[in-house]
Amino acid sequence: MRNNLRRLIFSCVLLLCLCGFAGAETARDVTQECAFRFAYACSSSSYLRDRNNETMFECESLLEPVLHITTGETKLSAIYLEYGRKRLPFEVQIKEEDSWRTIARCEGNYAQEYVSFPPVQGEMRLLFKTNGYAEKVGVSEIYCFSEGKIDPSIVHLWQPTAEKADLMVVVAHPDDEVLWLGGCIPYYAGERNMQVAVVYFTCSHPFREIELLNCLWHLGVRTYPLVGRFQDVKANSVEETYQKWDRDEVNAYMVDTLRTLRPEVVVTHGFDGEYGHAHHKTIAYALQRTVQLAAQQNEHSALPAWQVKKLYHHGGERPTTVMDWDQPLTAFQGRTGYEMACEGFLKHASQTRTWYTVAKRHKRWDSYVYSLTASTVGEDAIGGDLFENIPAECISTYNK
């Protein structure tokens, strides 16, 4: 009941943000009218609006980094910022005589942040809060908007990470969630409107986090994912991976995550690591172990124990479940889960220059097949649904 009330309140707030007053015009992107300046800049301000997340406008380490903005002929009412470096809270300030007045604040919790404020024209600034430490600030992209309704295809208003997940998708790197798991996320998050929490173990660069956010939003996820801070370092085996990722830290992180998100179903990499990737294998085997640990009250976590009902690994020599990612999805105007996965992969723009493609049906690394490797609700008899045998009342959509 409490979660449903929170969702209702958030939906109302989101609706107000997206719709504003009836008949409101769509907010215009007027970024090109604005001028930007960092004190002690280390790179070009043109990076702020080149719509390339691999570049960023940054300043030297400062106690109070400030991004100055001079508006054009159009008044600004909102800013959407994508971080290129460490996320920091900031205040939106305007100049009044000889002092600056704060008109809005942003907590800086997410790599994509939106903040609105009363219309402003002239000089304004973003004052980043460093908590008394000299910090470098890097901003990948900034969007400046006039008054009006925002376009949700551009501005992603992220909800907090799920308090209770239906499905938890656990992968090593950004893009693994679509390359190997195909239509899993668009089908369950978009089409069936389930609470899907996505967990990444490692992210090699801040722009990769922006890419994964763009992918997940496109596929229907609205709650912020968890992005682990394990180093994306080369390893040729599980044992070598554990020389870089402490085994106990991996277990503790995974147990805490399972107990925090409390998923009914978990899906992850195959034991073969798809094409043999050591990180993929490490996570596959770690989950097999930590799903058991999470169900036991023990020293690995102070959080209450949680019993996952079903654990699936991608592929397997004798897959138990074949998913149909080729069915048209109403939530995506008839496009299939596989087609949506391909579109999602394109959001990982830096990776489209590689050989990777979303694994096809009956092809190597088939993204349609899964093995049920742990279950408290029995074996799959029908197939085609990772939630087979899960009681309806356990799923977030039950009371909707």
Image: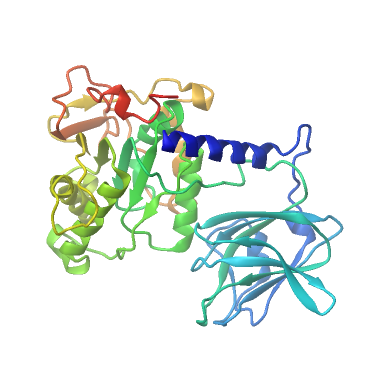
Residue 261, given in percent of the width and then of the height, sits at 32, 45
- Decide: is 93 above or below 212: below
Residue 276, given in percent of the width and then of the height, sits at 20, 50
Displayed quadrant of residue 128: bottom right
In the orientation shown, which residue stands out farthest toward the right?
73
Which residue is at a point 31% across and 23% down the rendered structure image?
Answer: 392
| Image quadrant occupied by the N terminus | top left
Residue 135, given in percent of the width and then of the height, sits at 52, 78
Foreground residue among 2 and 101: 2
| Image quadrant occupied by the C terminus | top left
Which residue is at a point 16% across and 44% down the rendered structure image?
Answer: 295
Which residue is at a point 34% across and 49% down the rendered structure image?
Answer: 199
Which residue is at a point 73% across and 50% down the rendered structure image?
Answer: 29
Q: Is residue 227 left or right of residue 258?
A: right
Q: Is residue 23 left or right of residue 19?
A: right
In the orientation shown, which residue stands out farthest toward the front?
1
Is residue 142 visible to us here? yes
Residue 398, given in percent of the width and then of the height, sits at 38, 24
Q: Is residue 46 left or right of residue 239?
A: right
In the orientation shown, which residue stands out farthest toward the top?
382
